[in-house]
C-alpha cells in the first residue's frame, strides 16, 4: 500500500504548524476527518486558537472558505441563501449563502438558535439544502468545522442529539504545555500578525483522493467489526446512558479506525486503532442520564470505562 495518507497528514501538520504550535493531536484528528469526509466539532475555552486552526485547515484544504458567526438572531436563510426578485427580468434569482463553500466554519455554533441549527441537518448529512421547494447541491468536498465553548451556558443553545450525531469527530482543544505557551509569547507583536496572513500551501493535486484510496485498501476483519458493534451495544446497555451509539456512529467508528490504520502506514486494522479514535467518535454522541450527570460522570470517562470493559478480540 502507498503512503499517501501519511503524506497528507505530514503536509497538513507542516502547513498548520506555520500558524499555530502544539496542535499535533488535533491536526491528526482533522486529517482523519478530511480523508473520511466527516464534519468536525472543536470544543475548548475561548482564546485557544479554535478559529485560527479552522482557518489554517481551510487554507490547506484549498477551495472556497466561508465563516458563519453563531448569534441568537442568525436565521437559516443567513446560511442557506434566499431567492431575490430581479426587477429587470421579473423573476426570482437564488443568491447562495455561505454554506455553498468547500469548508464552512460555524464559529460558536451553540449561540445560534435551534431553528438555525436545524438548517444544518440536511446540509451536513446529504450535502444539499432545500429552499422554497427547490433542492440545491453543495460542494463535493463540503465540510463543516464548528466551534463551541462547552463551559459557557449564558445565551447558548445546546446542540440537539441529531446534530451532534452528524459530527464525525469532536476534538477537545486543550491548554498548551508551558514550554509551548512560552514559545507563543515569544512571537508577540507584528511577527505573529504577519504569520497568520501568510498563505498556506494547499494539498498537492490528487493527494486527497489517493489518501482515500489508501483507506479503502485497509482490511478490517470480521472480529474487529464485531468489536465495534460490541462497543455500540455497550453504550446502549449502559445504565449511565439514555441514548447510546447510533448505526451512523458505529459506521463512523469503523471508518475512522481504518483511517487511523492508514495514517500509521498499515494495511490492516488492529484493536488499538479502534481505541485510538473511540473517544473522538463516541463521547459527544452519548447522552448521559440525569443520575450519571449528578454523580459527575462525563462521556469521556464513560468511553474509557467501556474500552476497559468490552472484550478485545485477539
Image (spheres, rainbow, N blue to C red):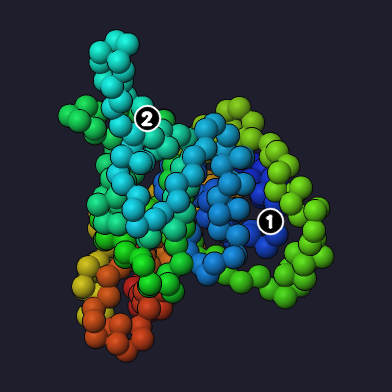
Residue 276 tag number = none
The local crowd at label 1, few if under 14, some if 14 to 19, many if 20 or more residues have their Cα within 10 Å, is: some
Residue 157: image location, x then y, percent: 32, 64
**For residue 94, what is the image quadrant?**
top left
Residue 20 tag number = 1
Q: Is residue 243 above or below residue 108?
A: below
Residue annotated with mark 2: 96
| Residue depicted at x 33% and y 37% | 80
Q: Is residue 203 above or below residue 45?
A: above
Can you name the residue that lies furthest to the front here? 87
Residue 280: image location, x then y, percent: 44, 62
Which image quadrant: the N terminus? top right
| Residue depicted at x 64% and y 31% | 204
- Left or right of residue 91: residue 306: right
Which image quadrant: the C terminus? bottom left
SS for callout 2: strand
Q: Nearer the viewer, mark 1 or mark 2?
A: 2
- Whether residue 128 is visible, yes or no, is no
Q: Nearer the viewer, residue 200 or 213?
A: 200
Can you name the residue that lies furthest to the left here? 133
**Of callouts 1 and 2, the N-terminal one:** 1
Residue 216: image location, x then y, percent: 45, 39
Can you name the residue that lies furthest to the top here? 89
Amino acid at each position: 500500500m502507498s503512503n499517501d495518507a501519511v503524506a497528507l497528514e505530514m503536509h497538513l501538520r507542516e502547513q498548520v504548524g506555520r500558524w499555530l504550535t502544539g496542535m499535533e493531536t488535533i491536526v491528526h484528528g482533522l486529517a482523519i476527518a478530511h480523508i473520511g469526509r466527516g464534519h468536525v466539532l472543536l470544543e475548548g475555552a475561548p482564546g485557544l486558537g479554535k478559529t485560527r486552526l479552522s482557518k489554517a485547515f481551510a487554507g490547506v484544504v484549498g477551495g472556497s472558505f466561508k465563516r458563519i458567526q453563531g448569534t441568537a438572531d442568525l436565521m437559516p436563510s443567513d446560511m442557506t441563501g434566499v431567492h431575490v426578485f430581479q426587477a429587470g427580468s421579473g423573476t426570482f434569482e437564488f443568491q447562495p449563502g455561505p454554506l455553498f463553500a468547500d469548508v464552512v466554519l460555524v464559529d460558536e455554533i451553540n449561540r445560534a438558535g435551534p431553528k438555525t441549527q436545524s438548517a444544518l441537518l440536511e446540509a451536513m448529512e446529504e450535502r444539499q439544502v432545500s429552499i422554497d421547494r427547490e433542492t440545491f447541491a453543495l460542494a463535493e468536498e463540503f465540510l463543516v468545522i464548528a466551534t463551541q465553548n462547552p463551559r459557557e451556558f449564558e445565551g447558548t443553545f445546546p446542540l440537539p442529539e441529531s446534530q451532534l450525531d452528524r459530527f464525525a469527530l469532536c476534538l477537545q482543544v486543550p491548554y498548551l504545555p508551558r514550554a509551548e505557551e512560552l514559545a507563543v509569547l515569544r512571537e508577540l507583536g507584528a511577527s505573529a500578525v504577519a504569520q497568520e496572513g501568510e498563505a498556506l500551501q494547499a494539498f498537492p493535486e490528487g493527494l486527497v483522493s489517493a489518501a482515500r484510496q489508501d483507506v479503502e485498501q485497509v482490511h478490517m476483519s470480521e472480529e474487529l467489526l464485531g468489536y465495534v458493534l460490541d462497543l455500540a451495544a455497550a453504550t446502549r446497555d449502559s445504565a449511565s446512558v439514555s441514548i447510546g451509539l447510533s448505526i451512523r456512529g458505529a459506521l463512523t467508528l469503523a471508518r475512522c479506525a481504518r483511517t487511523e490504520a492508514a495514517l500509521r502506514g498499515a494495511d490492516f486494522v488492529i484493536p488499538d486503532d479502534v481505541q485510538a479514535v473511540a473517544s473522538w467518535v463516541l463521547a459527544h454522541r452519548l447522552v448521559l442520564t440525569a443520575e450519571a450527570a449528578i454523580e459527575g460522570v462525563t462521556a469521556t470517562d464513560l468511553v474509557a470505562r467501556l474500552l476497559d470493559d468490552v472484550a478485545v478480540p485477539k
